[in-house]
Image: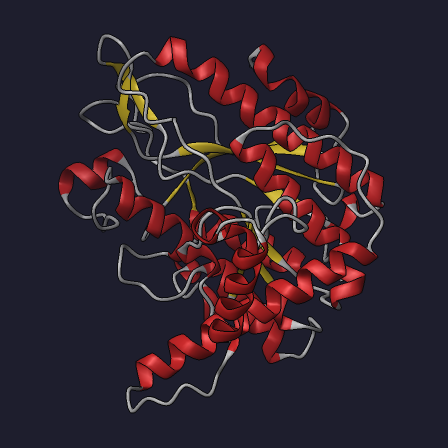
Amino acid sequence: GRTFGLVPELAPFKAMFDSGEGAMVGAVGPLLTPTSKTGMNAGTDALPRKLFSHNAQQSTWMAMETEGVRRGWGGSFMDEMIRNGGIGNPDFALITGGSSDIFLASERANQFKAPSNPTSLGIDMSVKTYLTSGSHGQQARDLLNAFLEDTTHGSDNPFARDVVAGQARGIENMRNYRAAFTQAPGLQTVFPNTRLGNQLLAVANAINLRGVIGTTRQVFYTDTGGFDTHNNQPGSMTGRLSEVADAIGAFRDAMSEMGVWNDVTLFTMSDFGRTLTDNGDGTDHGWGSHQFVFGGSVQGQRIYGDMPELDPDSERFTRTRARLIPSVSVDQYAATLGAWFGLDGTEIDRVLPNLNRFATRDLGFMSGSSA
């Protein structure tokens, strides 16, 4: 009997939800065990470390632990795929359109930072400011490239040798990626010229190159910010939401243009939601949050998880500041995506050892495997 709506800035999300290509997952957040206000107040429910800290909770969302953890669940999903020999070329299996972050950290593959325009980026362009654009500058750039690509530099320091090898491998991968870009048909979809729009364009280009680079399974990462709305929340949220919705709407159009929307899933995650109580001009660090999932394989037009009534005195919110207590763990959210990605139960348990503390392993918002 309850009715929900989305603000006008999220119109692209509403269109995908109505067409069955989008779903919402309510009250998701880091949990060690099912948790309630009563258990928190009594001290009987174990809580994740450093709740309400940006850095700690970003890391916990992406890697199930605070700073210092070495592997993210996106990278670990790919490790399981590589273990089974099911991805083809691993050089472009883990791609970031923005920063290199813990989510893609892996034991068996390296993150590759994909540019939104591969023809205009790389070592040559990045040093052009310092080495000039004239003929002598080109000679200098050629010498610098040759130096950076040379793996024969001798050193007794194993760390130095790893740095040299990693730098050379990165230059080679960028060269191969740029060559592949010239062989693939160009995308017609226009992306907004925003931080997130350019990152999702980079991801779309990488997917468009999948046949040329020979990678059959990929995990991508993009990031954006500006949602720490301690002040001026009414004034800042409109632009933030428009940027996210417009970029994701363009991404959906690009996937449909390529005919791969059924094989791609885009999902959101955030360090935490916001407090239900305001501070006069905004809100403060919360806990649980509501997330979106989009794709041709999403069981859409539904809200999964829980959307509790906005009653700060209920069991669903903390005693102070009315922070939403998650009813769905990040482990369950990740496990549902991992099963669609093609991992079996044993592989998912290796990546998400805390999953067995929760009764429901699969939240049901994906329709089978993409294999």
Tell me the quarter of the picture where residue 211 sits: bottom right
Taking 127 as reference, is 218 left or right? right
Q: In the current view of this chain or complex, which residue is farthest to the left?
A: 42
Residue 34 in view here? no
Q: Position of residue 3 (x, y in %)?
A: 58, 13
Specify the quadrant that holds the N terminus. top right
| Residue sitting at x 31%, y 53% | 32
| Residue sitting at x 36%, y 56% | 64
Q: Is residue 137 above or below residue 321?
A: below
| Residue sitting at x 18%, y 25% | 320
Q: Is residue 315 above or below residue 330?
A: above
State the residue in front, 218 or 301.
218
Taking 204 as reference, is 33 left or right? left
Taking 171 as reference, is 205 left or right? right
Specify the quadrant that holds the C terminus. bottom right
Q: How is the image coloured?
A: secondary structure
| Residue sitting at x 61%, y 75% | 82
Q: Position of residue 172 (x, y in %)?
A: 60, 71
State the residue in front, 308 or 118.
118
Q: Position of residue 63 (x, y in %)?
A: 39, 57
Taking 304 as reference, is 151 left or right? left
Q: Position of residue 331 (x, y in %)?
A: 45, 53
State the residue in front, 224 or 293.
224
Residue 171 in view here? yes
